[in-house]
Amino acid sequence: MLSQTKEVFGVLGAVFTLACSALPFHAALADTKPEHTIRFAYYGGTNLQTDYEHATAFAFKSVVETKSGGKIEVKLYPGGVLGTAEEVVESMIENRIQMGLPTEGVLTRWMPKLSSFAIPYLYDDINVAREMFQGEFGEKYRKMILDEVGVRILDVGEVGGLLAFTTNKRPIPDPKDIAGLKIRTLAHDGYIAFLKELGASPTPMPFAEVYTSMQTGVIDGHFNPISAVVSFKIYEVQDYLTLTEHLYGPMYIAVSEKFFQELDSNEQRVLYEAAKQARSVNYGITTLTEASGLSFLAEKGMTIVPLTVDQKAAYRGKTEQALKEVYSKKFGSEWVEEILAAADAAKRRVYE
């Protein structure tokens, strides 16, 4: 715990340093003409303290422009101004947009087997989840995305900690409580199957439509990490937060492969170095938001519903085996076993 706290405060210092150094740095490079321009698009807002997408992108921009000596310019496009997350990926594939922060759920449109990572309770905790996407399996996983989607994953951050449900009609401490509720999801086979096993009504829609749909009653709830509930002000339109902690949401620091191949080896290395530092900033922001988020959301009027060990076991028992069977049938048992083994190996690396 102490080492994690030190890491978080170190990352906060990095964010502060980046923010303070940005203006003098750009002034110093005002006469430098960039040789490459990266258009970096994402949905989040522009608060460096709470908007994890913006903090990630800002850190990346600062490191790239510094280490490239101004040869690579990074222009940030927050707030979904260049399109939905799916449209951004489409544009990245064609190099109309050079970078984005797609999630696993978004990329399943091009690579359906990614949905297999939605096996409920695959990760014991956030540390195991993070470790899963690094190391040997992480390298293989990124190569698969490059080959099948056509975008390069420079590093893997996250949308926050383990996922929780927000709802309006009632809290859902027992799996039977969610039956009949209209729950927003992506068009993600795993998420849809998970909700169906619980008896909910899966309602796929882009995240940009979620807030209004909650306001108008089109949907009764959704699931996301605490940090996303804070960042996107879901507390304004939802009453209950049930801490199921059933899934993890990786967020990919992704670049157009066509653009990446236009760079020389030194420039490519700069992008990898910047992505690694951006991932550290991302982890710091999401960790701090998760740590302070529950009290913040309670102050905003949400009812926080923690689950007991037995209640989590009930959710797991209702969904885990069924989802393993769904994925084994669809993508092959060897692939599912590889995922389970990788999660087990990540746990050993973290705790042994």
Image (tube, grey):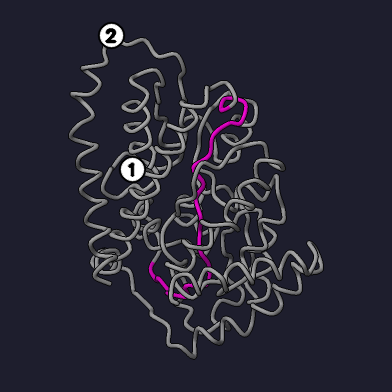
Q: Residue at x 55, y 42 (%)?
A: 153
Frontmost residue, 64 versus 184: 64
Disc 2 and disc 1: Cα gap in Å?
A: 26 Å
Judge whether 75 appears above or below 2 on screen: above
Q: Amino acid at mark 1?
A: Ala
Judge whether 331 appears above or below 246 on screen: above
Secondary structure of the residue carrying numbered label 1: helix
Secondary structure of the residue carrying numbered label 2: loop
Residue tagged 1? 55
Frontmost residue, 96 versus 171: 96
Where is residue 350 drawn, in percent x and y? 44, 71
Q: Is residue 43 visible?
A: yes
The C terminus lies in quadrant? bottom left
Range covered by the magenta-colored residues: 239-260
Q: Residue at x 41, y 44 (%)?
A: 276
Determine if the magenta segment contains residue 247: yes
The N terminus lies in quadrant? bottom left
